[in-house]
Image: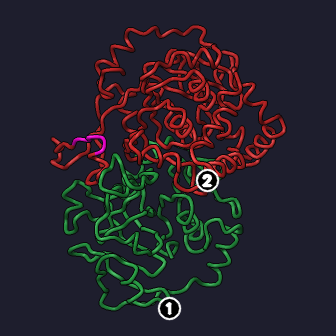
Chain colours: A red, B green
Amino acid sequence: MAGAAPWDFREARRRLETKPKSSGEKLSSVEDAALRVRDGDTVAAGGCLFSRTPMALVREILRQRRRRLTLVRNLMCTEGELMMVAGAVEKVVTAWMSIGLPWGVSKIMREHVESGRVPLEEWSHLALGLRFHAAAMGVPFLPTLTMLGSDLMGVGGTQTLRCPYTGETLALVPALFPDVALLHVHRADRFGNCQIDGYPHMDADIARAASTVLVTAEEIIPEAEVRRHPDRTAIPGFMVDAVAHAPFGSFPHECYGLYEADFDHFGEYVAAIDASGSRAVGDYLDRFVYGPATHAEYLERFGRERLARQAGRARELVG
Amino acid sequence: MGSRQLRDDTTVFAGVGVPLLAAVLAQHRHAPRLTLVIEGGIIAPRIEPGRLPISTNEMRAARHATMLPGITDTFLLAQRGFLDCGFIGGAQIDRHGNLNTSAIGRDYWKPTVRLPGSGGANDIVSLCKEVIVLTLHERRRFVETVDFVTSPGYLAGGDSRQQAGLLFGRVSRVVTTLGLFSFDPDDKRLRLDALHPGVTRDAVAAETGFEVLMAERVEATEPPAEDELSLLRAIDPERRFLA
């Protein structure tokens, strides 16, 4: 929230109260959905690391050349690197950033953080989850037993409190109300009711915490299907501002049960960075982000066979 | 070595890599009723030999799990007291078992080397009943003072951990490539309990940037048994995480 502290629950509440909470039509294109992101926004991305990352939305935000964003994500992966090199972020808030164990410490993150260009505000994984949860609850903080005594307390200015009941010391992690939530889900109807398969990560809390919720879905399903299984709805339509159909919307990251992350693609990406640093990411942005005009054109660069291979691997893994 | 620390009928918070190998080995060998909990929100997966995950948030890590809770809920299980043991590593560790996986250098905001960060390590060390540190034993890791406390061991020693409000967890063991360590019960300094076969006290001193206490009797660790080695090779045939 421009001007407001991330934990300003009164301002966050005011923004929700003044916003239409329609149960009507939310279907949109990825391009139109991304238009709701403004320069300077705090943007929280769902999923975790290379799982269910809202990559189609991230690429479109980069195509629209957004600037001065604060990107918040519990474990950050290539989406964070792309945003850094594209100059879209002025700060990242996370518990961990790199690509994954086999690829070592992210060179792109090191370059941007060590030079002071993009500050990395670190929280423990649970603390960041509780920040979203506090916001989802509409309160300014939550007490916890984590992070106490560590230097992470100072990074985000976490306060402590002597518990009024037991006298023990508690850490109070502040709520984080993002301006925009970017989420990718398995299924949604055209009113924005969302279903997620597999690990739910923090998406439901992020949807409740944010002022604007943008969703891409692998599949748009009939309303009747949602009503047949209301227990499967993780995010109700009235929270959602736009939902766009984006099959393989997390690719090259994974979507549980539908496609595995493309580790070969990661490998090529990291090899190029090892050879020529962030210039390689610049080339990558030209080829995979700025080059293709739409998500569909992006997928064409990989071809049906490659996508089918990734889908086959996922089916086998959840079988 | 980490594997042998895990008891049957307990729960373990395991990250990918060596900790997961240790936990899966324990399940196959002496702890069939050990429950694995994985950071990405995964309970009791059946990790398939030859198909080890590379992240705590992917389908290989979730294979045949009994439950997939949200990530916040998963860590709250540890805060509630459901997690008996956790495994972590670190780029730097000091005499009181404090770990740094965040930043090397004086200025956090402009570090000499930025590391990936805590992830769940801080939560595991703060909230699990017992934590085992698994690490390579190198002088650049075993430092007098860590540049940044990502995951608190015993902070400044003595009862400073409790004083900070960390009432429940503790780092019980440090398993390194040279030996097995614990902490002195009073001032909470790193203490050598056992050396791996062929390793000398001098070798430990040479690779440690501070004085290591010695147990009254420094034992020799039992080398991996043949069945442990063959199980490990079956679990990780590509040697992704085995040396």
Q: Position of residue A237 (x, y in %)?
A: 55, 17
Q: Answer yes or no: do the residues labelled 1 and 2 have beta carbons within 8 Å? A: no
Q: What residue type is labelled 1?
A: Gly
Residue at mark 1 shares a chain with residue at mark 2: no
Question: Where residue A244 is drawn, which disc sits there?
Answer: none
Chain letter of the residue carrying label 2: A
Q: Name the residue under label 1.
A: B198
Residue B86 location, quadrant: bottom left
Residue A285 in the figure: left or right of residue B88: right
Q: Is mark 1 on a helix, strand or loop?
A: loop
Residue B157 part of the magenta segment: no
Q: Where is residue A266 in the image (x, y as percent from the top left)?
A: 66, 47
**Residue A146 seen anywhere in this rendered image of the structure:** no
Q: What residue type is labelled 2?
A: Asp
Q: Name the residue under label 2.
A: A274
**Residue B6 seen anywhere in this rendered image of the structure:** yes
Residue B145 in the figure: left or right of residue B139: left
